[in-house]
Image (cartoon, rainbow, N blue to C red):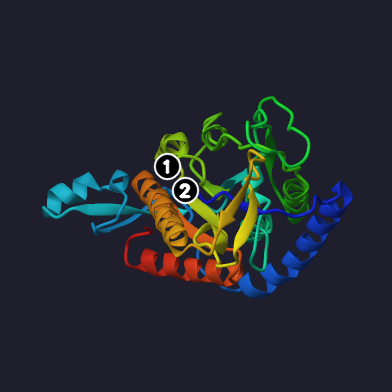
Amino acid sequence: MARAAAVTPPTPDGAGADRSGAVLSRLQLMVTRKLDGLLQGDYAGLLPGPGSEAGESREYRPGDDVRRMDWPVTARTTMPHVRRTVADRELETWLAVDLSASLDFGTGRWLKRDVVVAAAAALAHLTVRGGNRIGAVVGTGAPAAAPAGRWRGPAPPTGPGTLVRLPARAGRKEAQGLLRAIAGAEIRPGRSDLGALVDMLNRPPRRRGVAVVISDFLAPPQQWGRPIRKLRVRHDVLAIEVVDPRELELPDVGVLPVVDPETGELHEVQTADPRLRRRYADAAGAQRAAIATELRSAGAAHLRLRTDRDWLLDMVRFVAAQRHARTRGTTR
């Protein structure tokens, strides 16, 4: 559901690389201006950094991590208490970046792919300025066989999707190199295996840190829900969902030719039909609700970014909400 993209002329390979470079150059200034100085305290980041050193105890509040229960104090006071931890000064952050063909689409101010790169840039900026390490795994699609319906362009190649691991390193120069690798990744026809991509963050086992999954999450929740739950056992997890407004509702523009970017199948949709638009909006709403429910049940923090809104302002608001939740004793 909600995978159709308006038919556009193909973009030359060189133009895509130039565009990615231009986006990265603008992002550095935007992120620095708006995010620098936003966070103060033990650790500056989109999620409160996990700690390994024990701190003081306080009473349990709904939403607290039960793994941090302080059982001796609970037994002594007969009231449930949790043990706070001191944030680690050296934190390792890993990104799982989904660059399926469905990300190469956008009808707002940005392409969905641009928002993915922008989110990665903001995370890299917040991570490396504290001397922490950041790495990434990138999935660029799993080409499928040509469908039986009409196909726009040559049939896609067949074969496994590409999953690339970029090792975690500290330093601004290394972070810029990681972002260039993400921005320059070639988007191929087909759908990447989001579950396999997330599983790459579970292997090999790493010390407790922060894991961020950036995707449009259009793959079935059954594919990626279990790997995220497994990831949450050891790490703090942030899921960044990238959405385009046309994935939520259709405009009334008459007959609209659309192509599925992952399969290449071409359709003509009569958008003048109000019942069709209503069914589309209802199905899209149900799909997004299922994604949010799966992420919430997995224990991941959930940030939704849209291509028609100020993504950086949404990230700032998310940071503020996380900090406020932390002062109340919960980070979800």
* Residue 99 visible to the viewer: no
Left or right: residue 100 versus residue 157 is: left
Q: Which mark, by number, is residue 93?
A: none
Element type at marker 1?
Answer: helix
Residue 100 location (% of width, % of height): 64, 43
* Residue at 74% across, 51% down: 183
Residue at x-position 67% and y-position 30%: 146
Picture coordinates of residue 75, whole percent (x, y) = 14, 47
Q: Label 1 neighbourhood size at 10 Å, few (<14), some (14-19), many (20+)? A: some
Q: Residues within 10 Å of mark 2 (few under 14, many from 20)?
A: many
Q: x, y (%) of residue 229?
A: 40, 39
Q: Are marks 2 and 1 in contact (CB under 8 Å)?
A: yes
Q: Is residue 275 visible?
A: yes
Disc 2 residue type (three-letter): Val
Label tally:
2
In the rendered view, would you say 27 is above or below 92? below
- Kindly identify which numbered label has been placed on residue 232: 1
Residue assigned mark 2: 237
Q: For mark 2, give the secondary structure.
A: strand
N-term mark: 2 or 1: 1
Residue in the foreground of this view, choosing between 58 and 331: 331
Residue 21 in the figure: left or right of residue 160? right
Is residue 146 shown left or right of residue 176?
A: left
Percent of width and height locating residue 86: 43, 55
What is the residue that sits farthest to the right in this orientation? 14
* Residue closer to the observer: 173 or 185: 185
x 64%, y 67%: residue: 108
Q: CA distance from mark 2 to mark 1?
A: 6 Å
Quadrant of residue 157 in the image?
Answer: top right
Residue type highlighted by circle 1: Arg
Considering every residue shown, the one lying at the far left of the view is 78
- Residue 191 lies in what quarter of the image? top right
